[in-house]
Image (cartoon, coloured by chain):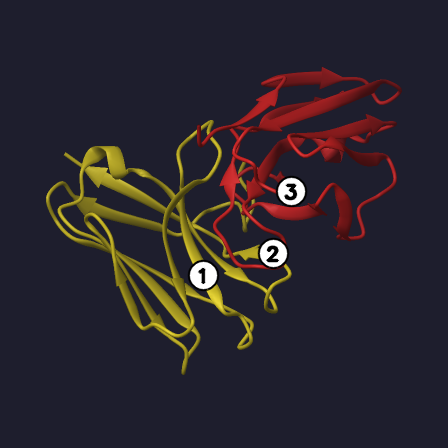
Amino acid sequence: DTEVTQTPKHLVMGMTNKKSLKCEQHMGHRAMYWYKQKAKKPPELMFVYSYEKLSINESVPSRFSPECPNSSLLNLHLHALQPEDSALYLCASSQEPGQTYEQYFGPGTRLTVT
Amino acid sequence: GESVGLHLPTLSVQEGDNSIINCAYSNSASDYFIWYKQESGKGPQFIIDIRSNMDKRQGQRVTVLLNKTVKHLSLQIAATQPGDSAVYFCAENYGGATNKLIFGTGTLLAVQP
């Protein structure tokens, strides 16, 4: 199984809502990532988790709150978002933190903030 | 209307021709590079990677070339097919074993039948 799954596929939320994005992998990978991708732009790294611990936060606003409950799951909690936060949110995983391996991406969650 | 900066560089090729997609990377300390393919509505899909101790690596119908002197990466696709139509991103592992990938701006490959 070389798949990273993400739910939901699409999400529309108001600026006062609280929602969560979910990501799951069963490849035994110990590094997991959140990226944000705007239309016609490359993915931009938001967070890196290594062995379920947050290792990189790319100065992401606190209205985005990541969580790694176990080695297979990664969540992104959303609260008080702005319309400019509308984007494709991608989750990825790789084999071992601290070593260079390819990152496998999920299909993404298309988020629209109204 | 569209704004400047929202247009991806585009490479248009005929089916059956070879394609070459170029990428300039930024960090001379980057030691690992990946090419990804992203189709509309999907996440990036791994194509091929190369480490900085190599100049060339070949896969099935794809070849990646690395020129560290000028910090340049290229992806060659042989006998391009309509299914190759997508946006292609290069990515560099930024600063050793931090697992931090920085993506290039992307190139839209359009294959004409």
> Residue A18 at x, y = what percent?
85, 20
Mark 3 vs mark 2, CA separation in Å = 9 Å
Mark 3 on the same chain as mark 2: no
Q: Is residue B48 left or right of residue A84?
A: left
Q: Colour of chain A?
A: red
**Dot 2, crowdedness within 10 Å: few (<14), some or many (≥20)?**
many
Which chain is disc 2 placed on? B
Which chain is disc 1 placed on? B
Q: Which chain is yellow?
A: B
**Dot 3, crowdedness within 10 Å: few (<14), some or many (≥20)?**
many
Task: Tell me if residue A113 can be seen.
Answer: no
Q: Which residue is mark 1?
A: B33
Residue A87 against residue B10 in the figure, above or below: above
> Residue B107 at x, y = what percent?
39, 50
Q: Nearer the viewer, residue A67 or B113?
A: A67
Q: Are marks 3 and 2 in contact (CB under 8 Å)?
A: yes
Mark 2 on the same chain as mark 1: yes
Q: Which residue is mark 3?
A: A33
Q: Is residue A51 left or right of residue B77?
A: right
Task: Tell me if residue A71 can be seen.
Answer: yes
Q: Please name the amino acid that badge 1 sits on.
A: Phe
> Residue A61 at x, y = what percent?
84, 43
Name the residue rendered at 70%, 24% in the picture: A21
What kind of element bears circle 2?
Answer: loop
Q: Which residue is mark 2?
A: B99
Name the residue rendered at 25%, 47% in the picture: B12
